[in-house]
Amino acid sequence: MIAGDSASHDVAGRLYLSLLKYDNNLQLTGALAKDWRISDDQLAITFHLKPDLRWTDNMPLTSADCVFTLELIQDNYTQSAFKSDYMLVDHSEAPDPYTFVVYYKEPFSPALSSWAGLAILPKHIFKGVDIMNTTLSRQPQATSGPYTLERWDSQQNILLKANPHYHDGTVWISERLTRIIPDTATQFLELSAGRLDSMNLTPIQYTRLFEGNAKLKKDYQRYHYLDFGYTYLGFNLKRKLFSDLRVRKAIALAIDRSEIIDGVLMGQGEPIASPYKPGTYWQNTALSPRAFNPSSASQLLDQAGWKDRDGDGWRDKDGQILRFTVLTNNGNKQRADTATIIKERLKSLGIDMQVRLIEWSAFIENFINKRDFDAVILGWSLNPEPDQYAMWHSSQTGPREFNFLSYHNDTVDRVLDQARRTFDRKQRKVFYDQMQQALFDDVPLVFLYAPYALPVLHKRIHGISQGAAGIAYDNEHWFVPAAMQTYHVTSISQQ
């Protein structure tokens, strides 16, 4: 409810479940809910919970927990980037322990999919708790997912243990240790030594290092698919420098995306012009990534009054050098290398772009949440629901909300509002195409690339299937045959 980053949700999603989830074909299916019904007027959804659901402390999980969770995220005190979806619920009710009904103020097309994003919390644990400041974020007392949190050693590892009472069948892999290793080269060394079962390979590891290692090819299986996400250079539009569209557009024209994709991603990515996965229905195919054009970029900067007046190689205006700092997270080599390439391209144009790498948790808390940055290189993870109200609507610029670039366009606000009230798929696409065109024209960010996901897993792990959702769906049902089981996490946790 509070965390906004994918790394946190990757762990939390194994502890707490939502009513719905996406299956391997990106269709909604039941998680805690066994079925649901949408009213004829599209203003109510009735969920029926699976029978005999229980929290890990053996207390029953009921519709009262669903009502409590909804009211908690709606509470004025709760700061959540996901809040806007649930503020449209007028009220809810729990006519019996197995039935949860939500009533909307007006038709809301992403309503059903939103219930795949709100993890239900135990009322008997969280009632009366300060959700913004609680030890339960690190020491949960009762969960509903396939795993429980056994131990969290900050900056070292997170140990999950299988929930023996998981409602959806046996969780065969009894312990999962997520080791926190910021450096990808060190990760690969650990993989090569057989001390990791899984990691996400970098492009050079995927294309060269893995390919040249016979033992890795024998013991591990690589996967390759276009990820649901993209990487971008985003501008803090509250900064005076970036209030000028000509400056933002000049920077976009000065970046050679093909250079980044070839040099950083080793070809393992696609250039993009909009915030949707390439090749999907919602992508505005009329848009193409801006071509690398330093000449046009220079002209725009001249028009904006940024010129090299003293011949020192840097553009200046009113006594100030055209200088800004880009932040990105330490440990993400792709983003750091991307920043380095952009820095050199902008330097040749007379722009002094500094690069600063920040540890992830400090990056989010001290810079993103406080809006204390000039520009960032980050990525967005996407889901199949096309609504991007939380990222682009001007009402979503508050604390912890996702529009931290402070973007405001009345047309975008209008079409996002209209798309949320429209159930016709073709009409929704018209609205989202308009949104994408406005983003392209306004350049609140520079869309860089959509990377390919390059996970690798040990071949002793069975039950993996690749679909439209990638490979992670139903990973709680992966298993290792008895003859291939080699160790327990608890025996190597101190390595």
Image (cartoon, grey):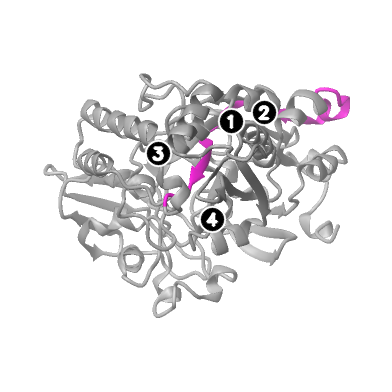
How far, Cα to Cα, is label 4 from label 3? 18 Å
Is 26 displayed left or right of 375 in the figure?
Answer: left
Where is residue 182 shown, x and y percent of the image? Answer: 73, 50
* Of the two numbered discs 1 and 4 in the rendering, the one whose residue sits closer to the viewer: 4
Type of residue at label 2? Leu
Give the mark nearer the N terminus: 4 vs 3: 3
Q: Secondary structure at mark 4?
A: loop
Type of residue at label 1? Pro
How far, Cα to Cα, is label 1 from label 4? 25 Å
* Residue labelled with disc 2: 265
* Residue labelled with disc 3: 245
Q: Which mark is residue 160?
A: none
* Residue labelled with disc 4: 373
Q: Is residue 455 magenta?
A: no
* Residue labelled with disc 1: 451
Front-lying residue, 20 or 245: 245
Front-lying residue, 197 or 480: 197
Q: Start and end of the magenta stretch?
A: 211-237
Assess whether mark 1 and mark 3 are in contact (beta carbons under 8 angstroms).
no
Q: Secondary structure at mark 2?
A: loop
Is 176 displayed left or right of 234 in the figure?
Answer: right
Above or below, 372 against 459 in this view is below
* Of the two numbered discs 3 and 1 in the rendering, the one whose residue sits closer to the viewer: 3
